[in-house]
Image (cartoon, grey):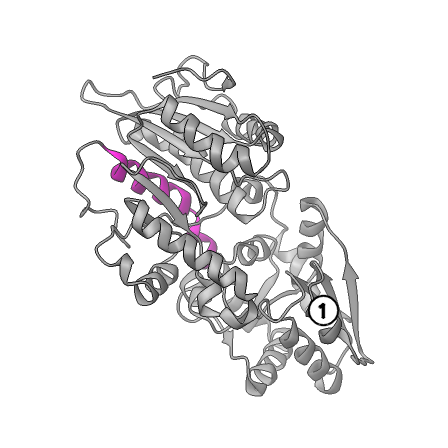
Amino acid sequence: MAIPRRADSLARSPRAPWAVPLRETAVTIRMAFVAVSYTVRRDGVSVYAENLLLELLRQAPRENVALWVDVYVCREAAAVLREVLRRNLNGEAALDARFRIIDLDGDGVFARYVRTPRQVRANGPYDVVFSPNLQPLWLPRRRSVAVLHDLTYRVAARHFPRWRVLYMDMLTRFWLRRGEAVASISRTTQDDLDRLYSGARGKPDLYLPNGLPTKLTATPRPDPDDCDAKFTDDPVEMLFVGRLNRLKGFDRVRAFAEHLDRHFRGAVRIHVVGKDTPDTPGLLEGMALDSVELIRHGYLDDDQLNALYRRCAYCLFPSRNEGFGLPLLEAIWQRCVPVLSEIAIFREVTGSGFPLFTADGDGIVRMTAFVERMRADPAYRREITDAMEGVLARWGDGYTRAARNLLAWSRPGRPHAMEVTRE
């Protein structure tokens, strides 16, 4: 395989004690991991990409695969990804896994979408060309797969500009025609894809689930005994994380705040972390609250946001649609109770039995009753917090499952109908 000029080798340590020795029948897989959308601020797609990559390296020897990975990433973000991987691998990289970061020469549109496909073709052929999200990339068709994170632009189309809906629709159709598979991070997304796009029928249902990211599990969890008092404190503190628009349900946050102001016995403080949008002025206009205090925060780094999660009793997620809802797991990890809208993805993530709330007036009343019951009933608090632990257990191996599924699909000569469909 051709060696690119701008490449950085990470995993060159002797075999670590934990490494699983490969049998003589080991399968060799060459993979192009095209992460041109990886960002310095490590958004949700970036976190997904780095965690899946880490698990690919860890799981390959266990699956008796000799894995070679070339990771294509833009120049500005390459140093960030390189440091994240060095910190998390920490000498674990198996001798049988080879890994290179190919630092693209530039960060603009030309480098991402013109130069990248050329480099992938020049450095190939690869057994699989993988993109952790849909990008307008003319990559080699053979064994190419991209990940669809959500179809919110179709499910909640009226909350998007028309140009955005048309662009994302075009991109989805492009990958359904061009790629060998379009993978999904959730069953909800796969169901939406099958329902909304006839071109998805006959494609492999490659399931590459989200999970608990290392940036989360690397932070210590609060002691549960130390957290119990925040449910009975006065004021009760709550948190909203997301863009201030109707898609993320900030209009429902406003309705909830106004209902609490009139009916809740006690004071409430709601922290708001997220960017303004064109919806924001109208959503805030005329809001008059007495016993509820709304506190606006600007951009917060991970440490500051985690401190707010630990401090608050509840995190409000009244979204109209989500791809997965990673902040939901972040809240649970910090023992902050999620208050969730009744949408399919939240039911998939939480499992049966966890309370979800409709978007109508009855749902707002039930949300207030939920907070009051949590405040007054210690047994109910334990029931909810036990259910939260179940959610973490449910997704603790998400990236491991995703890595194994992708490795299985990537094996040369494997048929398309195989065990890596939805579980």
Quarter of the rendering occupied by the C terminus: bottom left
Q: Is residue 266 above or below residue 34?
A: below
Q: Position of residue 393 (x, y in %)?
A: 43, 52
Specify the amino acid type for callout 1. Thr
Image quarter of residue 32 = top left
Residue 247 position by quadrant = bottom right
Q: Main secondary structure of the magenta part?
A: helix
Image quadrant of residue 284?
Answer: bottom right
In the image, 30 versus 344, the foreground residue is: 30
Of 367 and 179, nearer the camera is 179
> Is residue 323 at least partly visible in the picture?
no
Is residue 20 found left or right of 117 in the rendered image? Answer: left
Q: Residues within 10 Å of mark 1 (few under 14, many from 20)?
A: some
- Magenta residues span 390-411
Asked if residue 302 is among those painted magenta in the image, a careful observer would answer no
Give x and y (percent) for residue 92. 45, 24
Residue 197's x, y, as percent? 32, 63
Would you say residue 170 is visible in this rendering?
Answer: yes
Q: Secondary structure at mark 1?
A: helix
Q: Which residue is mark 1?
A: 280
Q: Is residue 391 magenta?
A: yes
Where in the figure is residue 236, as x and y percent of width and height?
73, 70
Q: In the displayed structure, would residue 186 be above or below residue 181? A: below
Q: Give me the residue at 34% from left, 61% from top.
A: 193
